[in-house]
Image: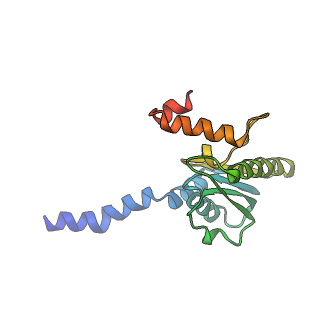
Amino acid sequence: MKDYRDLMLKEVLPIILRASDVRNRTRDLVRRCCPKGRVVLIAIGKASASMALGALEAFSGEVEGGAIVIPEGIEVGELKGYNLEIIRGGHPLPTPGSLRAGTAVLEWAATAGRGGAHVLVLVSGGASALAESPLGSISLEDLVNVNRALLTSGASISEDKHR
């Protein structure tokens, strides 16, 4: 029995941990799936800092800039030194930072389109509150009220998204 436990701890567990690491998974997928060339990176969500780090490792210097949208409390030390705009939005309820994030994401995407760069958008949980760009006269207060109503409704996230 000891041999089995040793095998699990020494060989299988490290494989499982590596496969579930967001940074490593993003790096590996970007290396396999994304075209080479100039890139604007946009990452939004609770795992956006880790996803962005993985993408930066995969592109090795080809990232021209972009926006990383994260909630309060997420460390971004390793992202410093890149031309990345770090914006803290609200989660689970949108904040003024969420509106700044929505504007920045749209501006970075438009800049890339004009300059011929590829745009890589990475999205994880929480993105719908972290970056907002409301249409027309919808206010931040309106967004907060709708989000609060959905959060307290008892509906699952998939039901909320289909309302």
The residue located at (73%, 42%) in the rendering is 133
Assign the N terminus to one quadrant of the image. Answer: bottom left
Q: Residue at x 63, y 47 (%)?
A: 94
The residue lying at 48 percent from left, 33 percent from top is 153
Residue at the left extreme of this rendering: 1
Location of residue 76 (image quadrant): bottom right
Q: Is 131 drawn above or below residue 142 in the view shown?
A: below
Kindly indicate the quadrant of the structure image that contains residue 49. bottom right
Position of 105 compared to 153: left or right? right
The answer to whether 63 is drawn above or below residue 32 in the figure is below
Q: Nearer the viewer, residue 38 or 152?
A: 152
In this view, the residue in front, 151 or 163, is: 151
Quarter placement of the C terminus? top right
Q: Is residue 117 above or below residue 157?
A: below
136 or 24, nearer to the observer: 136
Colour scheme employed for the rendering of this structure: rainbow
Task: Give the number of marks.
Answer: 0
Residue 85: horizontal and vertical position, in percent? 73, 61
How far across and how far down the image is residue 70, in percent?
61, 57
- Residue 34 in percent (x, y) is at 65, 51
Front-lying residue, 153 or 2: 153
Residue furthest top in the image: 163
x and y percent of residue 28 in the render? 54, 57
